[in-house]
Image (tube, rainbow, N blue to C red):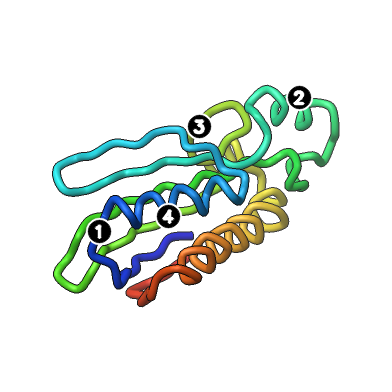
Amino acid sequence: MQGEFIVAATDLNDFASSYKQALLNMGFKIEKESQEGVVLKIKAVEGPSKLKAVLLRGLAKHASQFREANRTGAEAEMYAGSKGIVLKLNVVPYMAFANSKDIFLVTQGIGERYLADKPMVRDKFNQIISALMSRFQISQVSVKE
């Protein structure tokens, strides 16, 4: 699930700190943070460790359909725009064995995609935005699944 938002804030570092704190409060681990020109990119992962996710999926037949065996990635790009800070947020299911997106029908089955991943991603996306809305005024530009 991805979305683009305008945040009524002027300090990119203050907003980025609040964003990272919201992720940490939800159990995410910040994996990578980089600056490319004026764009700040933050990548975080939530869920069991790679080893635990692989073991759970290997031991239990339908473990891929349970949240405890799934991992979620939150990838954000933010920069100062003319109307405030622009936040581009992408929340996706992550592979059990790598810090990258699941690939439909390769690392992600049909049942996993529709029974576990879509609701999980939607919940995490909404939780992140709700946490940020408690501190900042946010306008939605676009959201799509």
Judged from the image, the secondary structure of the residue bearing numbered disc 1 is: loop
Query: Dot 4 lies on which element?
Result: helix
Image position of 14 (left or right of 79): right
The residues bearing labels 4 and 3 have C-alpha atoms spaced at a distance of: 23 Å
First in sequence: mark 2 vs mark 3: 2
Q: Measuring 79% from the left and 39% from the top, which residue is drawn there?
A: 63
For marks 1 and 4, the one nearer the N-term is: 1
At 70% from the left and 26% from the top, the residue drawn is: 54
- The residue that label 1 is drawn on is 11
Q: Amino acid at mark 1?
A: Asp
Q: In this picture, is 78 found above or below 50? A: below
At label 2, counting other C-alpha atoms closer than 10 Å, the crowd grade (few under 14, some 14-19, many 20 or more) is: some
Q: Amino acid at mark 3?
A: Asn
Q: Residues within 10 Å of mark 1 (few under 14, many from 20)?
A: few
Q: Is residue 49 left or right of residue 43?
A: right
Residue 16 higher or lower than 145, as above or below: above
Q: Which is more toward the observer, 119 or 89?
A: 89
Closest to the camera, between mark 4 and mark 3, is 4
Q: Report which residue position mark 3 lands on.
A: 99
Of callouts 1 and 2, which one flags the residue occurring earlier in the amino acid sequence?
1
Quarter holding residue 46:
top right
Q: How many marks?
A: 4
Cα separation between marks 4 and 2? 34 Å
- Identify the residue position indicated by label 2 in the image: 55
Please name which of the two marks, 1 or 3, marks the residue nearer to the observer: 1
Question: Which amino acid, by three-letter code, is at mark 2?
Answer: Leu
The Cα–Cα distance between marks 1 and 3, rounded to whole angstroms, is 29 Å
The quarter holding residue 78 reads bottom left
